[in-house]
Image: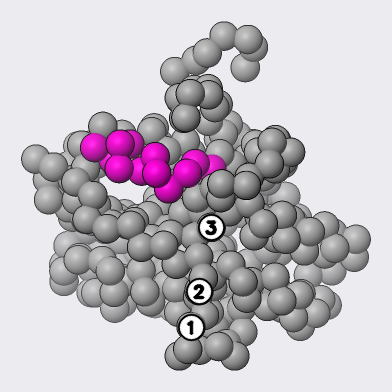
Amino acid sequence: MGDSVSKSDIEENGATISSPIPEKVAEMYNAPGGQGGHLIFDGQFHWGYWDEKNPDASLAEAADRLTQIMIDKSEISQGERFCDLGCGVGVPAMRIAKAKECFVDAITISKYQYDKAKQLAEEAGMSDRVRFIQGNALEMPCEDATYDGGWFFETIFHMGHREALREAYRILKPGATLLIADLPTRSNITEEFKTFAKEKIHSVFIPKEDYPGLLDEAGFDLIEIDDVTEFVIPPLVPKVKVAFKQYETEILQYVESQAIGRWVGMFEDMCENLGYMLVKAKRRA
């Protein structure tokens, strides 16, 4: 990107942080490791939620619980249009389409995820409700004010928060609800982890405190920031280790055995440096 600051650079806490490069994100999820990652989450590409109701839940079961929590927070109605901005292989998109009887446009930058999502939708008989798009969520192929609701489900850090919120404002209707599941930085985040996040997992994470200003600047009214770190982070690594053991045979069809240890290390680093929160906002008129 050179030494100059481009329009994809944003100012966070006085420091210039470059947004992730879309092509790098696509490469990561198209690679064998990215293709096999959804196995431990049973088709989902996000973390899990554990509380007193499901302390013994597997990683896949807890990921399913988190999907349901996001669906419950949505305000989409029957027959309305919803956008899933960074949809993985499409399981949450199909879940909300079925639960809310709405229509969903779901976009992923990954060719592998797009093909897999279409396959799963056809197998589930959901192709009439969910339309998958391969492309950049910052350049949605739609008119302004198209959607009645939408979410970034553990994806906004791959896009750059300011740019992503700007596009969400463009494509959502006035009054539409936007949900964001994000991983805010902890106060003890290390520079080493920031570099790792940017260079290896093509992500830029920000503090929770930055959200009110970013949402207001983009044209959204903040409804709530629900910090659920205690229900996501502490159980995650132990559950991940169990899941890797359970799906080891399938995972080794995608990667060599050493990759599993690196993945566990990545989850450990992320849990030491990041929290978890669910954000709800409404697009202003």
Whole-percent x, y for residue 75 in the image: 19, 66
Would you call the spot at circle 1 few (<14 residues within 10 Å), some (14-19), or many (20 or more)? some
Prevailing SS of the magenta stretch: helix
Q: Is residue 235 magenta?
A: no
Tell me the distance, in whole angstroms, between the alpha carbons under discs 3 and 2. Answer: 10 Å
Quadrant of the rendered image containing residue 209: top left
Q: Which residue is mark 3?
A: 275
Whole-percent x, y for residue 174 in the image: 12, 45
Q: Which residues are magenta?
A: 205-216
Quadrant containing the C terminus is top left
Whole-percent x, y for residue 196 in the image: 72, 40
Would you call the spot at circle 3 few (<14 residues within 10 Å), some (14-19), or many (20 or more)? many
Tell me the distance, in whole angstroms, between the alpha carbons under discs 1 and 2. Answer: 6 Å
Q: Amino acid at mark 1?
A: Asp
Give SS at disc 3: loop
Residue 59 seen in this snapshot: yes
Looking at this view, is 49 or 33 the one in front? 49
Q: Is residue 214 magenta?
A: yes
Q: Which residue is mark 2?
A: 231
Q: Amino acid at mark 2?
A: Phe
Quadrant containing the N terminus is top right
CB within 8 Å, label 1 to label 2: yes
Would you call the spot at circle 2 few (<14 residues within 10 Å), some (14-19), or many (20 or more)? some
Say whether residue 33 is left or right of residue 186.
right
Q: Is residue 32 above or below residue 77?
A: above
Looking at this view, is 207 or 196 the one in front? 207
Q: Single out the residue that lies furthest toward the left.
A: 285
Q: Is residue 149 above or below residue 110?
A: below
Task: Give the mark, 1 or 2, whose residue is nearer the N terminus.
Answer: 1
Identify the residue shown where x is 33% and y is 36%. 214
Q: Which residue is mark 1?
A: 51
Q: Single out the residue that lies furthest toward the top.
A: 4
